[in-house]
Amino acid sequence: MNLDFLFYPRSVAVIGASNVPGKVGNAIMRSITLKYRGRVYAVNVKGGEIEVNGKKFKVYRSILEVPDDVDVAVIAVPAKFVPDVVDECGQKGVKGAIVISAGFKEAGRADLEEELVKRARKWGIRLVGPNCLGVTNLENGFDCNFNPPERQARPKFGGIAFMSQSGAFGAAILDWAARHEVGMSKFISLGNMADLDESDFMSYLRDDPKTKVITAYLEGVKDGRKFFNIAKETTKVKPVIILKAGRTEAGAKAAVSHTGSLAGSYAIYQAAFEQTGVLGAKSMRQLFNYAKALAMQKPAKGDRVAIVTNGGGVGVMMSDGLLERGLKLAQLSD
Amino acid sequence: MNLDFLFYPRSVAVIGASNVPGKVGNAIMRSITLKYRGRVYAVNVKGGEIEVNGKKFKVYRSILEVPDDVDVAVIAVPAKFVPDVVDECGQKGVKGAIVISAGFKEAGRADLEEELVKRARKWGIRLVGPNCLGVTNLENGFDCNFNPPERQARPKFGGIAFMSQSGAFGAAILDWAARHEVGMSKFISLGNMADLDESDFMSYLRDDPKTKVITAYLEGVKDGRKFFNIAKETTKVKPVIILKAGRTEAGAKAAVSHTGSLAGSYAIYQAAFEQTGVLGAKSMRQLFNYAKALAMQKPAKGDRVAIVTNGGGVGVMMSDGLLERGLKLAQLSD
């Protein structure tokens, strides 16, 4: 699945763009105008002009007024207006819409979410979200994350792609990666996955030459059979590491109240991971330690490891650690 | 066992004190003159005068020349001279000797180590080491650690005592605690444990009012029965957390070549820990997370935990983490 139009748009419209600090539509404008070199158009029914990062933007009252093609719309208006905005995007020929707005299925409005998907389908628009943090391409600076840069660090460009069903967790990961100088290719906040889901993005990232390792935080997959098939194909090409939350009964209950995901039995996920070659991680640290190792070096040819150390205690600890994880100490020849 | 004379000496002689940067006897002088307010005497057969931390010290050719009582001697002269130096310490009335010098049992000179212990016993001197990093009391700045302060951070004063059979591991722990602002009471590098061993210090720390939690890195205990009895008494008074290295066959082999410890079967240690109430940690991080939690709050009354969070994903992850570790989510009343 080619979703390049979502990550490498030539032009973007921010619908709900705002001048008011603290507003989501202001934060998105600030994120997107920082490094991205494509054309950015501000849209807000109020019209007028706004200034962001020292640059002035004319505000169009509707995307239909924008005097140019628009590849992607980032939508941050109240939920009830989103379906109509998507219709306008369709008339304008927009290919992808990233719906930041919340107030859909997760807030008991499954009907509004169905309507949103119906309108998008009518125009052939692919949706990210709704109820998501946005999408960040670390390669070209296309970044509609509504946490502005002074509140949310961005990692450098590198080989690890990350998708997250939790916005707060995704934000924590971006901070972590930046602090540890771990390079990321693309970050996707999945939100409610009304249209594009974790499997669609996995399929895209499989063919993305900038991504070496695919990582994800998931509470539940949308379509088990689809996930199984795509994961199986993807792990043949590059490693996939998934932190599956909602493993225990209490965790699964918490997941329902969070993203409405039916977590299902973790044993089923474990079996699916094993059969498809997905690596399961149990903590954020493990997820990214796996990812770092796999992004930085080729898979080992066997299970034998040699330890080089200047500290005796560290050598003992490392020997224990390796054996306890099923590896072997290499026998060195004389 | 009262070892206060080792941690709160009124006067100290550094035998092997040196003016030459990079020499162990220079590093010790620099560590010890930084915060410690007791009297410090420099001893070196070369005599003369040295300057450390901007202060001048007359160098006595022998501890017998020091015109004052000496409580503790820190010895950093070549191994072969150490037994004679201990004899002089005995004549001087020294109570404790911290032998930094290496070149004893760990280097195949069990005979020299036996001689050292024989001499110390004759005079009633208690020994730390040999082949150790020194002792640090974070309360009064008595610090004969031979990693000088610019190469080795010191944590602030607090409730966690730590003893280590590995110098490099001990140094890493001090750095870690300083960086994470974890407070320590006393740090002991155990070295070869020719005289005082892990059980003696555990017994001392049990009665030390400044220590809330006792932690240790051990490759093997010196006397199993003694350890068992003292650990059982100690855990009634305060928590004891031990990172036992050499758990696997490969780890045990590495331990033999490191400190000569016979690691024995880990199953036996596990059983001993369980029967004595010692908490076993499997990594440095776990060791200190346990210690931090136990130093900062009283033991919980039960296994029920409530989670307060502003992030849905974090709530799911925490629920999983708690249940996977055998805890329960509290049922809140309405």
Image (spheres, coloured by chain):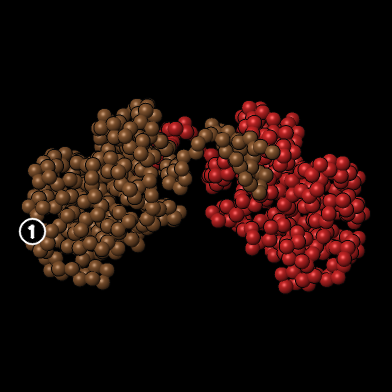
Chain colours: A red, B brown
Q: Could you tell me if residue A158 is visible in this image?
A: no
Q: Secondary structure at mark 1?
A: helix
Chain containing mark 1: B
Q: Residues within 10 Å of mark 1 (few under 14, many from 20)?
A: some
In front of the other: B243 or A221 = B243
On screen, residue B37 versus residue A177, left or right, reads left
Q: Residue at x 84, y 41 (%)?
A: A110
Describe residue B85's horizontal placement relative to residue A112 as left or right. Answer: left
Which residue is rendered at x = 9% and y = 46% of the image?
Answer: B123
Give the vertical position of A185 relative to A313 (above or below): below
User: Is B334 in front, or is B26?
Assistant: B334
Residue A174: in sight, yes or no?
A: yes
Query: How many numbered discs sit on the rendered protein?
Result: 1
The location of residue B91, given as percent across then percent down, is: 7, 52
Look at label 1 and name its amino acid: Leu
B96 above or below A248? below
Q: To which residue does mark 1 refer?
A: B64
Task: Residue A280: name its quadrant.
Answer: top right
Q: Quadrant of the N terminus of chain B?
A: top left
Percent position of residue B254, x then y: 32, 37
Q: Which of the 4 quarters of the picture holds residue A42? A: bottom right
Q: In this rendering, would A85 be left or right of B291?
A: right
**From the viewer's perspective, is A263 left or right of B289?**
right
Q: Quadrant of the C terminus of chain B?
A: top right
Q: Residue at x 72, y 73 (%)?
A: A54
| Residue A99 x/y as whole percent | 80, 51
Residue at 23% across, 71% down: B55
Q: Give the percent coordinates (x, y) of residue B110.
A: 16, 39
